[in-house]
Amino acid sequence: MLEEYSPTEVIEKAREAQYANYPLSPTVKNVFADRGIVSLYRHQADGIKYVEEGKNIVIVAPTAGGKSEVFIVPAVEAAFKGENTLLLYPTKALARDQHSRFSEFALYGVRCEIYDGDTPQGKREKIRERPPQIIISNMDMLHFILLHNRLFSKFFEKLKYVVLDEVHICSGIFGAHSANVLWRLKRLMKKKYGRTLQFIATSATIGNAKDFCESLCAEKFELVEGNSSPRSEFHHLIVSPNESYTVAALRIAEEIGKKALIFGNSHSVVERMGVMGSRMDLPLAVYRAGLRQEDRRRIEEEFKKGKTKFLATTSALELGIDIGDTDVVILAGFPGTITRVKQRIGRCGRKGKGYGVFVAKESPLDQYYVENPNEYLYGEPESCYVNPENENVRRLHILSAAKDAMISPDELDEKTLHMVQGLEEEGLMKKWGNLYCITKEGSKRARLINLRRGGGSIRIFNTETEKQIGTREVSMGIKELFEGAIYLHGGRAYFSQKLDLEKMEAWVEPVGHLSEEYTTALTEKSAEVVEERATRECLGHKLSFGKVHISEEVYGFTIKDVFGGNRLGEHTFEKPYLFEYDTYALWIDLEELVYSIPEFGDGLHAFEHVSIGMMPAITGADPKELGGLSYPSGRMYVYDSVEDGSGVTQVVYKKFESVTRMALNRLEKCECEKGCPKCILDPMCGNDNRFLNKESAKLIAEKLLKE
């Protein structure tokens, strides 16, 4: 198979199940028997026992590992006792897919309803008036439910369990928002109803599930490892093509000729594959978040029924939505973490042998796993990260909390009081006796909170219709929506006519043909330490962590072709776009190496590139969530690329030695002479990969690891 690509093949052997003799209630036993579940796996029984003991748990298991039963059983048993459960899923599509599992208990008086953005208004009113024992929703809708919690009093007064499905998704900025929404929920339950909540979380395999859940929920958790479910034999193929990895992924799908999911790592990559698929005349559809609900469901059904043979998708389909049997999963590029690899390839091979093809792109991390296939299959899973104290996020939820239930003096520590006073000065909150409440303007602001963003966002308008077609966070928007940029949205290419950072607006014009070019920003950056929070000796040098001020300037852009990434042109702006913000970072001082290594500055720049390229493997972060900056004087920064920080560099700070070892491995094994995309060239480099020296980067890594 795929001989022209000389793939590395690894076969994972099948694993037999381990069962436990757990006494299910007759009702649950009957429903499970109808679904073919006669006995529980050992980890399912362990998880349910912990819940019965009143403990918060997180169950970690791969796709199709039997996580759902661990919360289905307690939720159903609680319903029989007149107590309620709130299930929070990461996506609306997954919520609908999982709803059928609870509908099987309807004959026994257990009612379950979905309450999210797609629930019709009339249905919402009925749910609020006569709430079921189980409500399925998501974190975004919970934010609005809390703002209007008086309408949900009948449900909240009996709420016992909160289920966080696929909790590892609550990482980064979304995690910061999620932590604050959960804080508000706990606060409301204690303040209005005198109740404490019990949490049940499920997760794919990550390295710090227990600690992560404790940070997210501010509660103690027990860890349950789901390693007792069966597993089919699985064939892994690892390919490093001599052509564009996206072209290779499509060609491989065509050659295999079976029903296949093709995962890309961003909406722009998937959209480009859609363009290529049309040119190659492939029966391929594009699936990603941002498409209309009816379009997503139509695509799901057409793939399930076999009308669509190939589906190019983002992470939107890695979380277990039922799209029927899939023969092959192709990963167009390493998805950033071992967890995401397992989630994605877990979509196939559920009824027999599975096949997963990893098509490596020319990036340091992809090539690291090509050279180290055992790390790809059995490496240490990444650690998730969250910063609940992100000030931009926290102040928005303190504002919202004042609408949930007025804030009393005993809730005001020094930091919270400072935020409340700031919100009061802005006219978003006001004093009511000794209490603080929200104003009319504050209520409007609370309703506009986007849980996926940490700071402001740019609104995108179509010049032809003058209607808004989307938004983009400022930190990414200035690099994607500058005047002259080609921006992909909803399967169409747009040409950016204007970016106004004062009005936070971008105006884009539809391109009347399939674009064969794309643009990348040219940037200059600077960093200044605001506050050092921690320091330690690392590899013989001082490593620090703290708050920094970042100034980022987009001074121009390059034009490249879609298929090969070849540079076609460059433009410089008369007036650059400037974005400044405070965030968190780690930095290491290597002044002692400056004069002992030739072209040290270029070497440190290259070491910065390859190091950041490795960091997603230990954090789960998208590379766009990290920024880097190095100075010839010997200091290198790596920072969270969102205002006030996402928490990602805090994980890297603790594991910088591992990053350095991985970076040296890549520098040693890459066969190029002076540097290439497989080691030190970074497609997001603001200097367009100038001023780099591979050999000097290698010397820096060697000296660090010899210390």
Image (spheres, rainbow, N blue to C red):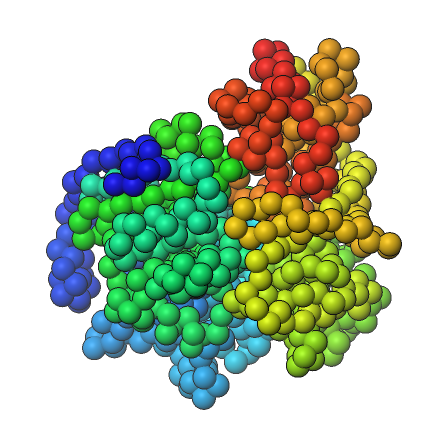
Horizontal and vertical percent for residue 546?
A: 72, 36
- Location of the N terminus by quadrant is top left
Q: Is residue 662 above or below residue 523?
A: above
- Which residue lies at the image location 73% right of the left edge and 30% below the top edge? 691
Horizontal and vertical percent for residue 259?
A: 27, 57
In terms of depth relative to the viewer, which is nearer, 113 or 412?
Answer: 113
Residue 69 can be seen, yes or no: no
- Which residue lies at the image location 69% right of the left edge and 40% below the top edge? 688
**Furthest residue to the right?**
574
Instruction: Name the image quarter holding residue 591.
Output: top right
Q: Is residue 626 left or right of residue 280?
A: right
Instruction: Name the image quarter holding residue 225.
Output: top left
Q: Is residue 324 above or below residue 257?
A: below
- Which residue lies at the image location 82% right of the left edge and 65% below the top edge? 502
Residue 417 can be seen, yes or no: yes
In terms of depth relative to the viewer, which is nearer, 52 or 207?
Answer: 207
- Location of the C terminus by quadrant is top right
- Which residue lies at the image location 44% right of the left edge and 49% below the top edge? 247
Horizontal and vertical percent for residue 524?
A: 78, 42
In terms of depth relative to the viewer, which is nearer, 198 or 148?
Answer: 148
User: How many marks can you see?
Assistant: 0
Horizontal and vertical percent for residue 705?
A: 58, 15
